[in-house]
Image: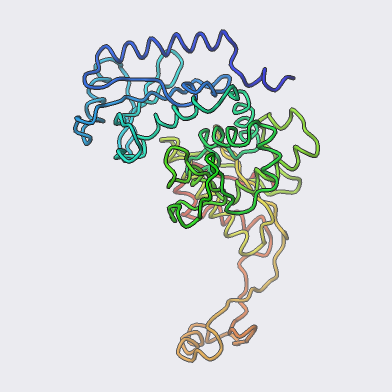
Amino acid sequence: MDVLESIKPTRAEELKAIKIVSKFLAKLNKRLVGGEAVVGGSFAKNTWLKGDHDIDIFVLFGKKQDTNKISEILEKTIKQVFLFVNKIAGSRDYFQIKYKGYLFELIPVLKIDNPEEALNIMDISPMHVSWVNKNINGKEDDVRKLKMFMKAANCYGAESYIKGFSGYVCEILTVYYGSFNDVIKNAVNWKEFEIIDTKKRKILIRSVDKSKISPLIVIDPVQKERNAAAALSHEKFELFINTCKEYLKKSSEEFFIKKIKIPEGAVVIKAKPVNGRKDIVGAKLLKAYEFIKNKLDEDFGVSSSSWYWTSKALFYYVLKTNELSEYKKHYGPHVGDDMHLARFKEKWHDKKILTENDRYYVNVKRKHTKLKPYLRDLINNPEIKEKVKSIKMQKI
């Protein structure tokens, strides 16, 4: 299997997409007053993957427009042109329309000349497209390989429920290092708070917005105060580095195939998502996965874990032990804290108060010492039940 052949759109697919996108834009622009719809995202940058039929459309409005009403203006227009419109609430509402087998996402933005004029993060997105197109220098296929590599490793996507690498970050990394292979070779040496700056300035970490610090800091070439990789979690950062190390040991086409990889001996839980918007559903699944992980880690210890989501969700956890002692230590105040000790004694009046490492504690009998009944109780917790439609143990 040729990796590029499997991920790069064929000429026929490309021509079909161009035709449909052109028709969509013509249809919309014919009715649009005070704005202009243009193609954006990976389609505009020619870094889209085979079979990807999601198209970003930026609807550019002049600065004279009332910025509080551009979503409203766009909504009114598209409802005159298209039958089914899905409105997505956000800092500025945007819209989704299904048209001829493609999902178009319409994003109202201000037409600006520099980032300082932006009134919303969305306003800068067209500038990202321009920067990539000016700097990609024929490396579009390297971006495609990097995207697919990350997808297969389960670390692609900046959505809050994924916390991985965005497509824009993939493009910046490819421009910075020069090729897919060079990204991989350099990533294995990344340390926490690694700074990537395409302009190779001596960026100080304190100059980056503190709320946007992440394990990898990718300075947005369009807006130097912004970390383009702000959504990246430590888990996905480490996962990518480790996958790069494995790839360099033995490069294989398998690294570009997205499949569910569950370690031997892992506990597997299957969940059916609730209905709703993808980002909201994904966020609920993530919370359910993390709630279970934290509880398991508290008692059994979790050495590794991850989750996958297609139509159903799979959570897996590799535990340090499958059986617990009959009693667990419940810690109270520090030795010398007499006020809180009195309350602790009152609460646990029927238990012997002991000390360990300068802390008071009591031995409390566990409800469960075996994994299966413990898990059964855990997945029926109201905290979990409200976040999924149904959930069950698949493998213990």
Q: Quadrant of the N terminus?
A: top right
Q: Residue furthest right?
A: 250
Vertical side of 376 occupied by 277: above or below: above
Residue 281 location, quadrant:
top left
Instruction: Residue at 46% x, 15% y: name it.
Output: 101
Using residue 320 as the reference point, say whether residue 29 is left or right of it.
Answer: left
Vertical side of 31 occupied by 258: above or below: below
Vertical side of 122 occupied by 267: above or below: below
* Residue closer to the observer: 289 or 175: 175
Q: Position of residue 384 (x, y in %)?
A: 49, 51
Instruction: Residue at 71% x, 32% y: name it.
Output: 255
* Residue closer to the observer: 170 or 286: 170
Q: Position of residue 199 (x, y in %)?
A: 52, 40
Q: Position of residue 232 (x, y in %)?
A: 54, 46
Instruction: Residue at 60% x, 33% y: name it.
Output: 174
Instruction: Residue at 28% x, 20% y: name it.
Output: 78
Using residue 348 as the reference point, say whether residue 37 is left or right of it.
Answer: left
- How is the structure coloured here? rainbow
* Residue closer to the observer: 352 or 2: 2
* Residue closer to the observer: 276 or 228: 228
Using residue 190 as the reference point, say whether residue 89 is left or right of it.
Answer: left
Q: Position of residue 381 (x, y in %)?
A: 50, 55
Residue 357 location, quadrant:
bottom right
Q: How many marks?
A: 0
Vertical side of 21 occupied by 126: above or below: below
